[in-house]
Amino acid sequence: MEVLLARHTETNYNVLELCNADPTVDVSLSQHGIKQAELLAIRLETIPFEAIVISELKRTKQTADIINYAHNAPILIDGRLNDIRTGFEGKPVALYDEARSSEPDIWKAKFNDGESLDELLEKVDDFLRHLQGQKMTYASILIVSHLTVLQLIASRIKSIPRQSALDVDIAQGDFIQLEL
């Protein structure tokens, strides 16, 4: 199965550099994010895929809707693709980064009501097992999600060691193609 991993485009929270993993918070694409999604749609226009899988967060749906204009593929929502719950909801990303970097093991670090990278990886692994079972249904799918989730998916598919997983680079509004 071909898997296209696309990172959602810029949001109002990205501009403000705030954390968000709560689907009930109104985080939307910025004007720049809409333009990024339109450019991404052009790049993906000739690449076939049979379904789009997104997180529960509005920004992935908005990005997918713009991409999907030329494809008309079914859009499936999967909460296992939600962004990491940092424990710093609505607070500056820099606070989360600072807290995480001060921990001896960033994979086990967990703050406030958040989740650890290990817990997010468990969700990603569960999603990938599900995806393996879909190989007979789909030859190619597009996943629109969040940086950390996509890094973990890519690292698992490419057998990248855990300590290098967060080095996988997928810019906002960009995608990579992998074979599952």
Image (cartoon, rainbow, N blue to C red):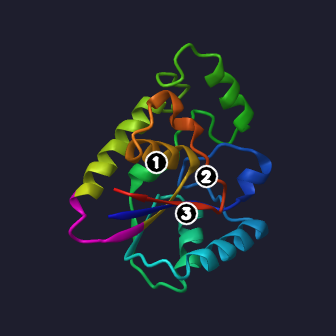
* Residue that sits furthest to the top in the current view: 104
Number of residues whose C-alpha sits closer than 10 Å to that of mark 1, classed few (under 14), some (14–19) or many (20 or more): many
Q: Is residue 168 magenta?
A: no
Taking depth in this image into account, of 7 and 23 the one nearest to the observer is 7
What mark, if any, has residue 170 been given in the picture?
A: 2
Q: Amino acid at mark 1?
A: Ala
Q: Secondary structure at mark 2?
A: loop
**First reached walking from the N terminus: tag 2 or tag 1:** 1
Residue at the spot of label 3: 60
- Residue at image point 66% right, 63% down: 28
Q: Which contiguous range is marked in magenta?
A: 133-141
- Residue at image point 39% right, 50% down: 80
Q: Amino acid at mark 2?
A: Ile
Is residue 7 found left or right of 31 in the rendered image? left
Q: Check contact, mark 2 vs mark 1: CB within 8 A.
A: yes
Q: Amino acid at mark 3?
A: Thr
**First reached walking from the N terminus: tag 3 or tag 1:** 3
